[in-house]
Image (cartoon, rainbow, N blue to C red):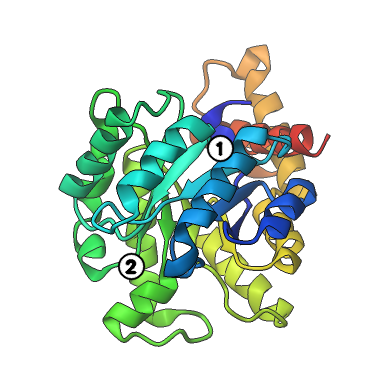
Amino acid sequence: MSASLRPRRSVLYMPASNARALEKAKVLDADGIIIDLEDAVAPDVKELAREQACAAIAAGGFGSREVILRVNGLDTVWGQADVVAAAKAGADAILFPKISSAAEVARCEAALAAAGVAATTRLWIMIETPLAILNLADIAATAAMPASRLSCFVMGTNDLAKETRARLTAGRLPMLGWLSTAVAAARAYGLDILDGVYNGLQDEAGLIRECEEGRDIGMDGKTLIHPNQIAPANQVFAPSEHEVEQARAIVAAFDLPENRSKGVITVGGRMVELMHAEMGRRTLAIAGAIAARQA
């Protein structure tokens, strides 16, 4: 499947210090696994966590799941060593925390190149500071630079709440402007974007509501903190049967010989334009990619 259409409905954080959790990740139905060396790991076990994480990634066994390694920041005592170790492990992407400017993205790119990280390894970045929100357009624009690895924004909503003193309310009204602006910046430069975590581990209704909010403003999926959050996220961020049927009908109608030169046609009593056919093709591609991953 195309990397740009890779399903990212559910991306689960797993602490690198927990060897059992890393093994369990290989059988979970998440689209992606973020093996975390940063927030989830205490300072006194950072080096052990790094060894375990890189060994698990190198050993493989994650199947079609995307494997992302979240390293410590380059300004920490562990960051550079994390990147060097990651170069040998072979993760699909390396996630850097607390990126606030285009210059910091460039520094991450340089660190990956200096460590000899494979050119196929993508760069993901956390958007979790007030300065990052103010610099979203410049940060996203680095993806247009030659040989850029940048491919995904990950929203750090807990950190944003901490740094701005905004409250994490139902509906996230205090954050919707930031989240929508981040989606616009990501889309302007061809990036994927993942919503922040939901903290209520036993509140499935709240999780579903927040997944729907993220989906409706354009997020590709949600980052998660517990395996029981995977199924709701997968369901919400997948195209529904009705959406797939509609997409198939619109694409098929525009593919008819008599419609190929038209910009507007009628399908099922609705006026649709060429842009709806393009949206439909993407819906069908995502649905196909999800089916292929599950198979």
Badge 2 element: helix
Q: Residue furthest right?
A: 295
Q: Is residue 258 above or below residue 205?
A: above
Dot 2 surroundings within 10 Å: few (below 14), some, or many (20 or more)? some
Task: Look at 33% across and 34% down and name the residue there.
Answer: 112
Q: Residue furthest top?
A: 257
Q: Give coordinates of residue 107: x percent, y percent.
A: 21, 42
Q: Give coordinates of residue 149: x percent, y percent.
A: 36, 32
Residue 56 falls in image quadrant:
top right
Kindly identify the amino acid type of the residue bearing the numbered disc 2: Trp
Q: How many marks?
A: 2
Quadrant holding the N terminus: top right
249 lies left or right of 109: right
Kindly identify the amino acid type of the residue bearing the numbered disc 1: Met
Residue underneath mark 1 = 279
Q: Is residue 72 above or below residue 124?
A: below
Residue underneath mark 2 = 178
Q: Which sits in the foreground, 159 or 62?
A: 62
36 lies left or right of 117: right
